C-alpha cells in the first residue's frame, strides 16, 4: 500500500460522498435564491470548487484527528485494532501532521472565499475536532457528529452570499461497540441503553431528518429534481 492509499484509508476518503449532500444543499439553495444573473458561470464554478475543497479538507481533518485521538482505544477494540495507527501502518505523529496540514488547507481555502468564511473557519474546526472527545463524557456524542455535518449547509450558503440524519446513522454504527464501550467506560447511546431503545431513537432521528428535508423542499423554488432527491 503506497503512502497516498494509506492516508486515504485512514480517513475513509470514499465516505466523503456521504458528507457532500450537506454542503450541496446550502450551495444550491443560495444559487436558487440569488437574483438571476447575479454572477456568471465562471464565478459559480469557482465557488463550487472552493466549497468542495473546504468540505474535503475539513473532513480529512476531522477523521484524521478522530483516528489519532482514539488510537489507544482502537488498539484495545478487536473491531478497530487493524486501523492504520494502532496497526502501525501510519505513525501517530505522522497522522497528527496530516491533520495539521489539512486544517491549514481548510482555513486557506475558506479564506479565498470571503472574510466571513475566513473568520468562521476556526469555529468550524473546533466543532469537528471536539467531537472526537465527546464519547469520553456524554452519550450524545452522536449528535455532536451530526452537528459537525449539519453546519455544512450554512458554510456553503455563506460561501455563496443534516444534524439528525448523521446522529441517527452514528447510533446504528455505534451498536458494534456497545459492549466494548461499557467495559471501557465510554459513552454512547447503545452503551447506555438497550439495542432496541437505541434503534428506536435512531428511527426517531431519521424521521426528523426526513421531515426537515421535506419542509426545506417546500420553502425552495419548485424543482422536480429537488423533490426526487428528497
Image (cartoon, rainbow, N blue to C red):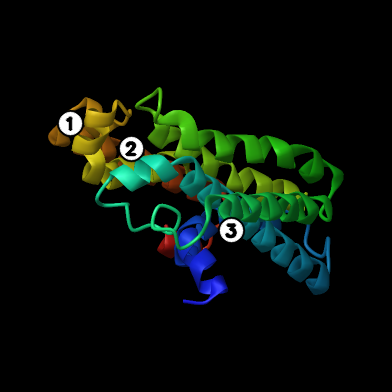
- Badge 2, how many Cα within 10 Å: few under 14, some, many 20+? many
Q: Which mark is residue 155?
A: none
Q: Is residue 82 visible?
A: yes
Q: Which mark is residue 197?
A: 1
Dot 1: element: helix
Q: Nearer the viewer, residue 120 or 138?
A: 138
- Nearer the N terminus, badge 3 or badge 2? 3
Distance CA(mark 1)–CA(mark 3): 33 Å
Mark 1 or mark 2, which is nearer to you? 1
Residue located at (15% from left, 30% from top): 194
Of all residues, the one furthest to the bottom in this rendering is 2
Side of 110 where 28 appears, left or right: left
Q: Secondary structure at mark 2?
A: helix
Q: Is residue 225 visible?
A: no
Query: Counting residues from the N terminus, which is met first, the one under dot 1 or under dot 2?
Result: 1
Residue wearing tag 2: 205
Asked which quadrant contains residue 137, the reply is top left
Question: Could you tell me which residue is drawn at 41 percent across and 32 percent down?
Answer: 141
Instruction: Please give the residue where the numbered disc 3 appears in the rendered image.
Output: 24
Amino acid at each position: 500500500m503506497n503512502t497516498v492509499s494509506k492516508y486515504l484509508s485512514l480517513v475513509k476518503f470514499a465516505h466523503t460522498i456521504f458528507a457532500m449532500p450537506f454542503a450541496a444543499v446550502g450551495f444550491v439553495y443560495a444559487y436558487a435564491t440569488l437574483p438571476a444573473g447575479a454572477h456568471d458561470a465562471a464565478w459559480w464554478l469557482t465557488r463550487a470548487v472552493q466549497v468542495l475543497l473546504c468540505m474535503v479538507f475539513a473532513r480529512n481533518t476531522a477523521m484524521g484527528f478522530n483516528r489519532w485521538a482514539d488510537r489507544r482505544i482502537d488498539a484495545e477494540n478487536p473491531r478497530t485494532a487493524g486501523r492504520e495507527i494502532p496497526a502501525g501502518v501510519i505513525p501517530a505523529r505522522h497522522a497528527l501532521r496530516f491533520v495539521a496540514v489539512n486544517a491549514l488547507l481548510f482555513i486557506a481555502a475558506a479564506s479565498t472565499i470571503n472574510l466571513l468564511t475566513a473568520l468562521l473557519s476556526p469555529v468550524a474546526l473546533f466543532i469537528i475536532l471536539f467531537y472526537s472527545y465527546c464519547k469520553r463524557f456524554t452519550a450524545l456524542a452522536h449528535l455532536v457528529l451530526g452537528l459537525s455535518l449539519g453546519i455544512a449547509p450554512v458554510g456553503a450558503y455563506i460561501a455563496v452570499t443534516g444534524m439528525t440524519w448523521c446522529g441517527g446513522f452514528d447510533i446504528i454504527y455505534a451498536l458494534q461497540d456497545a459492549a466494548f464501550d461499557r467495559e471501557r467506560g465510554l459513552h454512547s447511546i447503545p452503551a447506555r441503553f438497550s439495542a432496541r431503545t437505541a434503534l428506536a431513537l435512531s428511527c426517531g432521528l431519521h424521521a426528523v431528518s426526513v421531515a426537515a428535508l421535506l419542509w426545506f423542499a417546500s420553502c425552495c423554488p419548485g424543482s422536480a429534481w429537488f423533490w426526487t432527491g428528497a
